[in-house]
Amino acid sequence: MTALDFYKFIFKNRIEYHWADNAEEKDVVFFVSFDEAKELNKLLDASILDESGIECHMKNGYLAFWADEILSHYGIELKDIFEEDDE
């Protein structure tokens, strides 16, 4: 997956995201509907899913992921995809 692939997925699907603290580091949490999860799965190569998979939290109608867990696997920086909050 390239940065452009992930960028298109996020913005084409109007995925909601927020900068937040994750284990005392700035990260981005993003929210994917169950239907969009199929598309996300197709973007990812098997090596990121083989061992322990990707941690997520299932909510009412969507899944929540930490972006850095996925993007770091591909050498993609958070700022390459997401605009930083003004806070």
Image (spheres, rainbow, N blue to C red):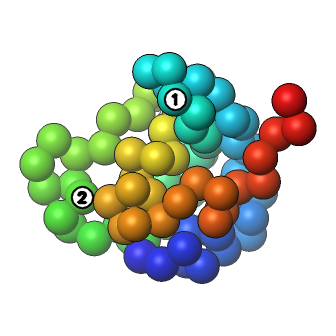
**N-terminal of the two: label 2 or label 1?**
1
Give how far across and how far down residue 24 sits, in percent: 50, 20
* Residue 1 versus residue 21 in the image, above or below: below
Give how far across and how far down residue 18 sits, in percent: 71, 36
Numbered label tally: 2
Q: Label 2 amino acid?
A: Ile
- Alpha carbon separation for disc pair 2 and 1: 21 Å
Give how far across and how far down residue 74 sits, in percent: 37, 67
Q: Residues within 10 Å of mark 1 (few under 14, many from 20)?
A: few
Instruction: Give the quadrant of residue 16.
Output: top right
The residue located at (44%, 58%) in the rendering is 71
**Residue that label 1 marks:** 25
Q: Label 1 amino acid?
A: Glu
**Residue that label 2 marks:** 48
The residue located at (40%, 66%) in the rendering is 75
Could you say whether the residue bearing mark 2 is in a helix, strand or loop? helix
Q: Nearer the viewer, residue 79 or 34?
A: 79
The residue located at (82%, 39%) in the rendering is 85
* Residue 35 versus residue 85 in the image, above or below: below
In the picture, measured across the screen, residue 58 lies left or right of residue 51, that is right
Give how far across and how far down residue 83 sits, in percent: 78, 54
CB under 8 Å between callouts 2 and 1? no
